[in-house]
């Protein structure tokens, strides 16, 4: 097989250039998570995947009910559905079977999620510098652990904008002379942190009246997805300052 000399020369030149930058101390290096923390972090990622799968089943049930009855059912009511209730709601045998299948999968996922959470809380402890994360509306122990293990030392982010970008909470536009010249790679950053802050935003909107009012004002001007992402962005920025300055969450400053 013939050897591509051009490619070899390019690789050789690139290697020498990278070695030169490293010797000067100006080569940007990625953060490597401590080996002892990776197993629990991966378990948290698996939990997040199962939560998303559970949500998919709930949405599937909601869609099927709406399509066949014209009504709607909240997620909490769906979680409490029993086979006899499904038969009353959907007299059609095939539709009832479809919903019961989703319910069976959803409850199996819930059992696995609960089991993983129990193991995670035994294996991982929230470090003192991350304890104040629990003062943020929408963030409990599991999301706090997720943010801790996915963020690492907050000192590696020079500015709050760097952290928000890493959490995929900002846009990815390319600008030149104040004009948009395209979009960047939307997959840059940490997708697990992005998911964690969106989850936190959903809980914050549900249980905090001030954040809910902010979300509703944004939703009136844009749409639900943009408004939710705006809340997630606010929470990500707040968490950066909480970790950097070792302070508790301040609703007035954040919103």
Image (cartoon, rainbow, N blue to C red):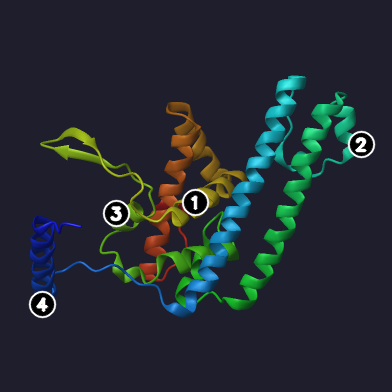
- Looking at the rendered structure, the secondary structure element under dot 1 is helix
Q: Residue at x 49, y 51 (%)?
A: 195
In the visual, does 93 lie left or right of 225? Answer: right
Q: Which numbered disc, 1 or 2, marks the residue that appears first in the sequence?
A: 2
Q: Position of residue 5 (x, y in %)?
A: 9, 59
The residue mark sitting in front, 1 or 2, is 2
For the residues labelled 3 and 4, the Cα–Cα distance comes to 29 Å
- Looking at the rendered structure, the secondary structure element under dot 4 is helix
What's the mark number on residue 161?
3
Residues at badges 4 and 2 in contact (C-beta under 8 Å)?
no
Quickly name the residue at label 4: 23
Q: Is residue 13 visible?
A: yes
Choose top left, top right, bottom left or bottom right for residue 124. Answer: bottom right
Q: Residues within 10 Å of mark 4 (few under 14, many from 20)?
A: few
The residue mark sitting in front, 3 or 4, is 4
Q: Nearer the viewer, residue 18 or 200?
A: 18
What's the mark number on residue 84?
2
In the visual, does 72 lie left or right of 186? Answer: right
For the residues labelled 2 and 3, the Cα–Cα distance comes to 52 Å
Choose top left, top right, bottom left or bottom right for residue 209. Answer: top right
- Looking at the rendered structure, the secondary structure element under dot 2 is helix
Quickly name the residue at label 1: 195
């Amino acid at each position: 097989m013939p050897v591509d000399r051009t490619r070899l020369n390019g690789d050789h030149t690139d290697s020498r250039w990278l070695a030169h930058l490293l010797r000067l101390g100006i080569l940007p290096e990625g953060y490597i998570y401590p080996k002892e923390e990776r197993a629990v972090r991966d378990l948290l990622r698996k939990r997040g995947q199962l939560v998303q799968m559970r949500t998919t089943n709930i949405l599937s049930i909601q869609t099927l009910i709406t399509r066949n009855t014209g009504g709607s059912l909240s997620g909490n009511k769906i979680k409490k559905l029993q086979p006899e209730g499904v038969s009353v709601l959907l007299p059609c045998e095939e539709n009832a079977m479809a919903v019961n299948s989703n319910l069976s999968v959803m409850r199996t996922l819930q059992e696995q999620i609960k089991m993983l959470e129990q193991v995670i809380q035994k294996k991982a402890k929230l470090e003192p510098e991350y304890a104040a994360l629990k003062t943020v509306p929408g963030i409990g122990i599991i999301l706090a652990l997720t943010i801790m293990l996915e963020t690492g030392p907050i000192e590696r982010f020079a500015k709050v904008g760097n952290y928000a970008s890493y959490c995929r909470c900002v846009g990815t536009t390319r600008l030149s002379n104040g004009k948009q010249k395209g979009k960047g790679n939307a997959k840059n950053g940490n997708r697990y942190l992005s998911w964690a802050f969106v989850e936190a935003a959903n809980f914050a909107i549900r249980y905090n009246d001030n954040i809910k009012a902010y979300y509703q004002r944004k939703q009136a001007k844009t749409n639900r997805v943009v408004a939710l992402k705006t809340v997630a962005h606010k929470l990500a920025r707040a968490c950066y300052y909480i970790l950097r300055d070792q302070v508790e969450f301040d609703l007035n400053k954040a919103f």
